[in-house]
Image (cartoon, rainbow, N blue to C red):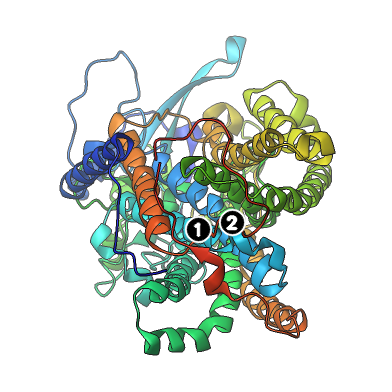
């Protein structure tokens, strides 16, 4: 059973309890920040901030309203990070979470190449630049809690029911029912199909493009794009190799050509 | 003729290069101890910077002279290009060593660099790149062994290498073909992130094709610099005849690029006035069309300045293209900002200084460049001022 979370943006009041719960459960350090008069602090996800709530003033005229969007790893069904990693440091688990350094066995395979950061369409993985031997950091969907049949920390902290945890298919059905029964909702479930679908899904009463979502993106998963190119590797290797060998023998001159050793000489650095 | 002992002339220019290498070595040591954040300006928005974008991607592209020359000389047996074959192999080998060094510098957990050899993430493009680059560098070292053992006498080893030469040569073309293209495939993953003027499923083709046609241009530049530095005649006839390869390949490159843009329906974006579109137009007009015309016009191609200027445009153009893919094309989607720190520049400078020093040392001690007067009539060198090599 693959689990997911349905985020109902219309229900979020921006209290940021989820942000605090995440920090507490995962023991992530807090950075003291200057008062910048900015609502969302920290402004971006970083190695020590696996989730954060960003605010948007959306809509026009009398319809203008504040909306709050919780961000974290989307836990793709076919994650780009997993496919991009050349040491198997990411894993999409059966339960739904995409986790880094997945098992006891490969907990230290990561080379720190940061290709996962290039690959992620949502720019989620972050890097501990200040450490000598840094790791990649991102939301792990409280995989440890899920294994104990507990809900993720952020879900337990949400006071308004904006976050709902459960089986992904059940959540999808509920999302569909919610957006169809209430005309305020945008008729789209973000994460249902984006990049092959994600475990975290959003519904909203404000168009997604006004809330910082990347809309009209590919419905094909990112690994499927890469694989389209990568699958040719063995054929190119064999075919091109055979062709070159054939050409080398075919064009070989009958008589022995130049004696290479007689042709070149070290340079005398005279001036 | 190989009776000469090892020699390395020290000049002021070379002392400068050595200082630059030492500074880079010290800075690298500092980076290995204190981490990337202490030395670089890399950040969460810009995980790949100067070392990957320039030293790795461009270094490897510039080393493309190695495999294109190998194909022309050793597979197609076009002997008239023999004079430049060894120099091309040498610069290519040095380019790969630099790329591997910058890769080691750039990876966060550098002591783990060997992991991909054992834990096969074969669904990653980087896996293919990593394997091909490391094996191909080994192969180039072995190919160079053939030259090395001409000076350092060791008949048994030379004989073994002699038996291996055909498979080495073939692998030495197949592997770079694969990974030059997969350097392009690396960015297929950036669907919706890389600006559509550059993102394409044909990225692997564009990368390997441009690395190949850049080869002759790079060899031309290297050959000209080397001939000036050592007061020799440049191999002008070889350079000129190589322009045919580059010209045709660039025309095909340009046509396929246009077809690809049309097919994906983004042709209009080239003229939408954005920063990306301007950079794209510069790339296409100045660095693709202009050199094609310069190569095509005999009165330009037949002069040294003409062929060298056009070749510089080709080489800078490929670098420009790689920079556009890594930086220009990604900027809009990833946000943030990145400009390399002084240390990143100094380490880069040190690596390329090392390349120059190694090149000088090797051509002065091994039979790399053709004997004077071999390829064409003998005359005293009169081409411009000499670099203080």
Q: Residue at image x 17%, y 26%? A: A32
Q: Chain of mark 1?
A: B
Tell me if residue A34 can be seen.
yes
Q: Earlier in the sequence, mark 1 or mark 2?
A: 2
Task: Answer left or right for A111 relative to B162.
Answer: left
Dot 2 corresponds to which residue?
B65
> Where residue A151 sits: x, y (%)?
32, 56
Q: Residue at image x 59%, y 58%? A: B84
For residue B71, what is the image quadrant? Answer: bottom right
For residue A185, what is the image quadrant? Answer: top right
Q: Which mark is residue B92?
A: 1
The crowd level at tag 1 (other Cα within 10 Å; few <14, some 14-19, many 20+) is many
The crowd level at tag 2 (other Cα within 10 Å; few <14, some 14-19, many 20+) is many
In the rendered view, would you say A179 is above or below A140? Answer: above
Helix, strand or loop at disc 2?
helix
Extreme-top residue of the structure:
A61
Q: Which mark is residue A148?
A: none
Count how many numbered circles sit on residues in the image: 2
> Where residue B369 sits: x, y (%)?
52, 58
> Where residue A257 sits: x, y (%)?
68, 78
Q: CA distance from mark 1 to mark 2?
A: 6 Å
> Where residue A75 sits: x, y (%)?
45, 55
Q: Nearer the viewer, residue B324 or B332?
A: B324
The answer to whether the residue labelled 1 contacts the one labelled 2, judged by CB atoms less than 8 Å apart, is yes
Q: Nearer the viewer, residue B49 or A213?
A: B49
Task: Answer left or right for B220 relative to B242.
Answer: left
Tell me if residue A159 can be seen.
no
Helix, strand or loop at disc 1?
helix
Q: Residue at image x 26%, y 75%? A: A105
């Amino acid at each position: 059973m693959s689990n997911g979370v349905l985020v109902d943006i219309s229900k979020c009041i921006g209290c940021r309890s989820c942000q605090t719960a995440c920090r507490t459960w995962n023991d992530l350090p807090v950075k003291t920040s200057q008062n910048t008069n900015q609502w969302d602090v920290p402004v971006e996800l970083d190695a020590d901030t696996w989730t954060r709530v960003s605010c948007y003033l959306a809509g026009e005229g009398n319809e203008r309203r504040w909306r709050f969007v919780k961000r974290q790893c989307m836990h793709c069904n076919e994650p780009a990070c997993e496919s991009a990693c050349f040491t198997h440091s990411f894993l999409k688990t059966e339960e739904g979470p995409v986790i880094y350094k997945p098992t006891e066995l490969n907990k230290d395979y990561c080379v720190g190449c940061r290709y996962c950061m290039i690959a992620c369409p949502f720019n989620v993985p972050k890097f501990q630049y200040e450490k000598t031997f840094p790791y990649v950091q991102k939301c792990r969907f409280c995989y440890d809690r899920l294994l104990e049949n507990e809900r993720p920390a952020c879900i337990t902290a949400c006071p308004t029911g904006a976050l709902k945890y459960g089986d992904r298919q059940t959540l999808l059905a509920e999302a569909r029912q919610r957006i169809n029964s209430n005309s305020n909702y945008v008729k789209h479930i973000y994460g249902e199909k984006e990049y092959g679908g994600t475990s975290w899904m959003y519904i909203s009463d404000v168009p997604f493009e006004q809330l910082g979502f990347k809309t009209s993106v590919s419905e094909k998963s990112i690994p499927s794009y890469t694989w389209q190119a990568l699958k040719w590797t063995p054929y190119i290797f064999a075919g091109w190799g055979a062709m070159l060998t054939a050409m080398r023998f075919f064009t070989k001159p009958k008589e022995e050509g130049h004696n290479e050793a007689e042709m070149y000489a070290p340079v005398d650095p005279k001036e | 003729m190989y009776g000469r002992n090892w020699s390395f002339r020290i000049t002021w220019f070379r002392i400068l290069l050595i200082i630059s290498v030492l500074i880079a070595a010290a800075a690298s040591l500092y980076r290995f101890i204190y981490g990337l954040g202490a030395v670089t300006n890399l950040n969460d928005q810009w995980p790949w910077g100067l070392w990957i974008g320039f030293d790795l991607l461009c270094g490897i592209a510039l080393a493309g002279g190695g495999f294109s020359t190998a194909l022309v000389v050793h597979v197609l047996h076009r002997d008239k290009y023999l004079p430049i074959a060894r120099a091309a192999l040498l610069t290519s080998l040095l380019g790969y060593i630099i790329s591997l060094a910058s890769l080691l510098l750039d990876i966060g957990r550098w002591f783990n660099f060997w992991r991909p050899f054992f834990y096969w993430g074969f669904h990653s493009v980087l896996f293919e790149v990593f394997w091909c680059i490391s094996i191909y560098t080994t192969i180039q070292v072995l190919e160079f062994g053939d030259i090395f053992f001409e000076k350092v006498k060791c008949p048994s080893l030379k004989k073994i290498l002699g038996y291996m030469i055909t498979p080495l040569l073939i692998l030495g073309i197949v592997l770079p073909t694969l990974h030059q293209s997969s350097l392009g495939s690396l960015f297929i993953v950036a669907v919706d992130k890389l600006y559509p003027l550059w993102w394409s499923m044909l990225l692997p083709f564009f990368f390997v094709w441009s690395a190949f046609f850049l080869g002759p241009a790079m060899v031309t530049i290297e050959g000209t610099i080397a001939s000036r530095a050592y007061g020799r005649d440049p191999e002008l006839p070889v350079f000129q005849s190589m322009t045919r390869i580059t010209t045709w390949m660039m025309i095909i490159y340009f046509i396929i690029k246009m077809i690809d843009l049309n097919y994906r329906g983004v042709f209009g974006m080239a003229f939408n006035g954005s920063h990306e579109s301007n950079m794209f137009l510069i790339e296409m007009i100045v660095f693709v069309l202009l050199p094609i015309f310069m190569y095509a016009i005999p009165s330009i191609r037949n002069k040294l300045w003409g062929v060298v200027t056009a070749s510089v445009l080709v080489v800078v153009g490929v670098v420009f293209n790689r920079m556009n893919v890594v930086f220009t094309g990604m900027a809009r989607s990833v946000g943030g900002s990145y400009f390399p720190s002084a240390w990143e520049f100094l380490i880069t400078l040190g690596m390329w200084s090392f390349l120059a020093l190694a090149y000088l040392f090797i051509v002065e001690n091994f039979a790399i460049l053709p004997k004077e007067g071999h390829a064409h009539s003998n005359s005293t060198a009169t081409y411009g001022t000499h670099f203080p090599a």
